[in-house]
Amino acid sequence: MVRLESTRLIFRDHHLEDLEPYCAMESDQVYRAHQPVHPRPELERSFREAWLPRKEMGLLATVLKADGRYIGRTGLYPFRTDEGDIVPGEATLAFYLARPFWGLGLATEAGHTFVEHGFRDLGLRKIHAGMNAANKASQRVVEKLGFKLVRSGGDATSRWLDFELDGIR
C-alpha cells in the first residue's frame, strides 16, 4: 500500500521482497561509514522485527517509481528526549538511501515530502534531524529543507549534529 509519493519516489510499508536490497545496503562498508557492518543473520532479524511491522509513524520503504526498486527507507519517527520520553507534536526526519542513489537529489525530494506531510497532515510543531558531523551531504539536505543547527556534541572520534525545523513557516 502506497502511503505517500513524490515526483520520483513511492513511500510504502516494507515488504518481505525488500529484504535483499535492504541487506545489500546495510552491508555496504561505505554506506555504513563510522558504524560497523552487522552480520547477515542480525540484518535479517532487524529487518523482520523493526521494518516489516506496520507503524503509524516510522520509516517507510523508499521505492523508485520508474522501476519499483527498493532504494532505502525514509520518513518520520517520534522524537524522544534524552531520557527516552516521546515529545507530542514533534518527530525526527531520517533518510537512508543505498549508495548508488546518492547525489541525485532523492534525499532532498524525500525530505521535502515528509516535512510537508508532517506539518500538513500530522500537525507537527517541530521536526528534528540528527546526523554524524562527517556526513556533509546529509547536512546539505536538511539545510536545503530549512532546518537550523541547534546543537552538536560527541568527541574526537564521533561528532554529531542536531537540526530543527519549526512548523510555523
Image (cartoon, rainbow, N blue to C red):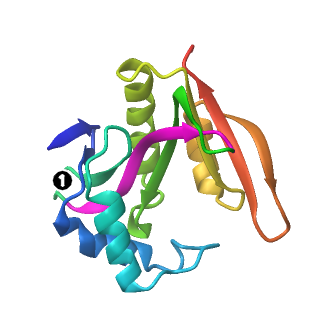
Which region is colored magenta? Answer: 69-82
Q: In the image shown, does 36 or 108 lie closer to the viewer?
A: 36
Extreme residue toward the top, this view: 168
Q: Which residue is mark 1?
A: 66
Residue 61 % position (x, y): 29, 54
Query: In this picture, is 73 found above or below 39?
Result: above
Q: In the image shown, does 115 or 144 lie closer to the viewer?
A: 115
| Residue 4: quadrant of the picture | top left
Q: In the image shown, does 103 or 159 lie closer to the viewer?
A: 159
Residue ID at (66%, 39%): 163
Q: Describe residue 45's horizontal placement relative to residue 146 as left or right.
A: left
Residue 13 % position (x, y): 23, 50
| Residue 39: quadrant of the picture | bottom left
Residue 58 % position (x, y): 38, 45
Residue 51 % position (x, y): 32, 59
Extreme residue toward the right, this view: 156
Q: Is residue 10 magenta?
A: no
Mark 1: which secondary structure?
loop
Query: In this picture, is 97 found above or below 10?
Result: below
Residue ID at (45%, 58%): 96
* Screen quadrant of the C terminus: top right
Q: Describe residue 115's horizontal placement relative to residue 5 as left or right.
A: right
* Screen quadrant of the N terminus: top left
Three-letter code, disc 1 = Ala
Residue ID at (54%, 34%): 145
Q: Describe residue 60's horizontal placement relative to residue 35 as left or right.
A: left
Decide: few, some or many residues near mark 1? Use Cα within 10 Å; few <14, some 14-19, many ≥20: few
Residue ID at (44%, 68%): 99
Overall secondary structure of the magenta section: strand
Q: In the image shown, does 107 or 44 lie closer to the viewer?
A: 44
